[in-house]
Amino acid sequence: MATLNSTVRFSFRNTGTFFGVHVSATPFVLSYDQLTLAGGDVRRTTSLSLSMKDLLTLALLQMNNFYQSRKSQRNVEVVVLGKKVPLYGGGPSLASSPGKPSSVATIPLSLSFMVKSRAYVLGKLVKPKFEIGVECKVVTNPAKLNARVPLKNYCQYY
């Protein structure tokens, strides 16, 4: 069983000069190989507790949207949390190497989410949509658990 608690911080910037945008996001999913370890959504004070049986109801969760006015930016904080997630045989690769019992193996994790925004330019007549998917490949060192890991150089946008 694995328990994981992490926080993702990013800033959303609206560079539009004439209109504000309504912003939403898909749930943040933190996974090891193809096994989902934790998830979270864009809420300011609450967090999403994700276990394997909750994966089926993940698509039904209501996201908290926010409005971003023109020429402004906002810092968003997302708590990505997984409690007692079964590893189903994925745990032995997380152990230290057999020759060096004091060495700690690094853990490759993948964080993925999508940010969606919609603008209402002429009332509700013109509604341009913007979507950006983000996937970050991060290697975590268990010896440095409380250290901040900048995701700037590890993310791909699609």
Image (tube, helix red, strand yellow):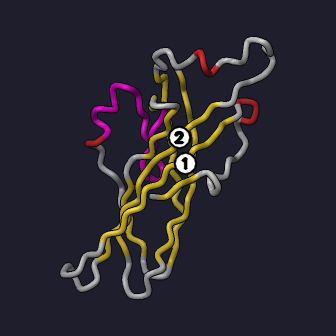
Identify the residue under disc 1.
136
Task: Using the numbered discs, state the Cα–Cα distance from disc 1 to disc 2 in whole angstroms.
Answer: 6 Å
**Seen from this angle, which residue lies furthest left?**
125
Residue visible at 30% across and 44% down in the picture: 61
Few, some or many residues within 10 Å of mark 2 (<14, 14–19, 20+): many
Q: Considering the numbered disc 1 on the image, is that residue within a helix, a strand or a loop?
A: strand
The magenta segment is 37-58
Residue corresponding to mark 2: 110
Q: Position of residue 76 (x, y in %)?
A: 51, 59
Camera-side residue of 146 and 98: 98
Q: Is residue 21 left or right of residue 125?
A: right
Do the CB atoms of the residues marked 1 and 2 lie less than 8 Å apart? yes
Rendered view: 12 above or below 47? below
Assess disc 1: are there few (<14), some (14-19) or many (≥20) residues with their C-alpha within 10 Å of its C-alpha: some
What residue lies at 48% left-to-right and 50% top-to-bottom?
Answer: 45
Report the disc number at residue 61. none
